[in-house]
Image (cartoon, rainbow, N blue to C red):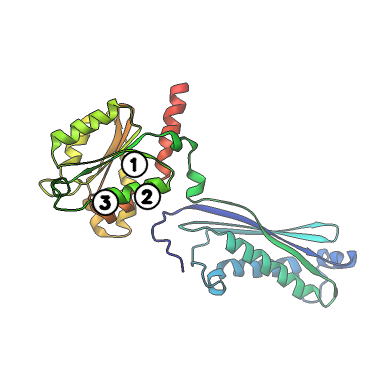
Amino acid sequence: MVSITNKANSLRQAVANAVLKVSSIETIEAINNRAVPKGDVFEFSRAAGLLAIKKTSDVIPDCHPLPIEFAAIQHTIQGLEITISVEVHTIYKTGVEVEAMHGAAITALTMYDMLKPIDKNIEISSVRLINKKGGKTDFKDNLHHNLKCAVIVCSDSVSLGTKEDLAGKAVIEKLQKNGLTISAYQIIPDEIDMIQLKAKELSEEGYDLTLFTGGTGLSHRDVTPEAISPLIDREIPGIMEAARNYGQQRTPYAMLSRGVAGFIKNTLVLTLPGSTKGASETIDALFPYVIHIFSVVEGMRHD
């Protein structure tokens, strides 16, 4: 199975349809009048479809088990065609389009099985996804292509050349996958004065987004929050709350991160852990969702 451990939970929705065609109006009348020998076609097939939705991962090998928060199945008759509409919701890391399609298919097959004694020419003509919502693609923002971004690594050992920078490069790679272009990348020591100077410089130079990685832990040399906090004009506590919550689901040590986030003038500044894994997971937790901030700010400027 494909790993989804790096994904964050979000509301996922999907609607799928199946179309079943009967050969005579008598079949439709038997369904409506509940005169089919095997029972109430709509109710039996709806129950089968709901079970199929819940059991999708049992029969589709690469599907992940997930919680079904909502499921609804409707039948609509037009002439000799019955359209089965299946809607499924979850709050999870992966979507429910296969669950919706599986539910539609099994609903249609159950109807076929119940109707075949009275109609030998039933046809299931299609099973298809109508729409889906949720996941990172729904949260991408068109403004991200125009953002001026910087990644600054705060590390004594990396700045001295005794250690290779892995965290900063991992952050850059993940940002690029989110469609962002990095205009500045620099390594500086864990010194409050130097961190503050760099943050001010980048803000004055018109950077939209600056990420500092390193110095958010509890070592006496971890001073990035102390350096950045006094410069922040508008703190956004929810950003790092989201990052710590994401990290806490993977390691209990995430609670020890002291990262801060907010605007220095018009520059959004994020402080990330110095470990490669911690920095990468913070990007996974925040992007592309955090880019929406710039749409909000842009809208406020035009109000």
Q: Which residue is mark 2?
A: 174
Residue 299: x, y in percent? 47, 27
Query: Which numbered disc, 3 or 2, marks the residue that appears first in the sequence?
Result: 3
> As shown in the figure, which amino acid type bears the numbered disc 1?
Gly
Q: Earlier in the sequence, mark 3 or mark 1?
A: 3
Residue drawn where x is 42% and y is 43% of the image? 289
Residue at the image position 81 percent from the left and 66 percent from the top: 31
Checking the image for residue 294, the label placed there is none
> Residue 167: which numbered mark, if any?
3
Q: CA separation, marks 3 and 2? A: 11 Å
Asked whether 139 or 148 is in front, the reply is 148
Mark 3–mark 1 CB contact (< 8 Å): no
State the mark number for residue 238. 1
Q: Secondary structure at mark 2?
A: helix
Q: Is residue 39 visible?
A: no
Percent of width and height locating residue 101: 63, 63
Residue sitting at 23 percent across and 29 percent down? 200
Q: Quadrant of residue 159?
A: top left
Q: Amino acid at mark 3?
A: Ala
Q: Is residue 225 left or right of residue 88?
A: left
Decide: is 92 above or below 48. Answer: above
Q: Residues within 10 Å of mark 1 (few under 14, many from 20)?
A: few
